[in-house]
Image (spheres, rainbow, N blue to C red):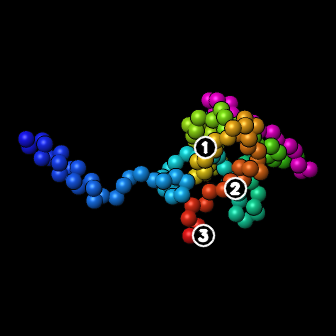
Amino acid sequence: MLQLLKNFFMGLGSIFRKPRIVVFPTEKIIIPEKSRGMLNLKLDLDSLNVLCNGCGDCASACPEQCITIKRKAQEDGEQVLDRFKHDLGKCIFCGECVDECALDAIGFSHRYKNADSERENLIREKNDLIRPPGTIRGFWK
């Protein structure tokens, strides 16, 4: 009998509580701060150049081999990043590439809507990864 009364009052209390369901996409989902969305390449805020130098540590640390990097030599002989390709179809969002980067040049964005019906659209190039939509959380709000 005691359990029955306890369940009754718990059910009665849930009537007046705010529902925990979010009506997507009309309501915005609050993404946790340490969520792992799509990769993004970070920029040097002074020169607006990509911090990545194309060393390839992130590509070698990736267990799924979803990162492809190509470097090119400048006139002064310095090696710089030419192409950075990330395949979202293979990525398991483990974070090994972010942890391995010594320059802290790549990170996770808060972009979580990455589904697509075409396989080719899941491959992101360097320009797509520089500043994907949704990387700055609440800056303009």
Screen quadrant of the N terminus: top left
Q: Residue at x 27, y 53 (%)?
A: 14
Q: Amino acid at mark 2?
A: Arg
Instruction: Find disc 2 in the rendering and name its residue.
Output: 131
Q: What's drawn in magenta, residue-wise?
A: 62-76
One can see residue 59 in this view: no
**Label at residue 140:** 3
Q: Position of residue 51 (x, y in %)?
A: 71, 53
* SS of the residue under disc 2: loop
Q: Nearer the viewer, residue 140 or 6?
A: 6
Q: Nearer the viewer, residue 56 or 17?
A: 17
* SS of the residue under disc 1: helix
Report if residue 71 lies within the magenta region: yes
- Residue 82's quadrant in the figure? top right
* SS of the residue under disc 3: loop
Q: Amino acid at mark 3?
A: Trp
Local crowd size for mark 3, using a 10 Å CA cut-off: few (<14), some (14–19), many (≥20): few
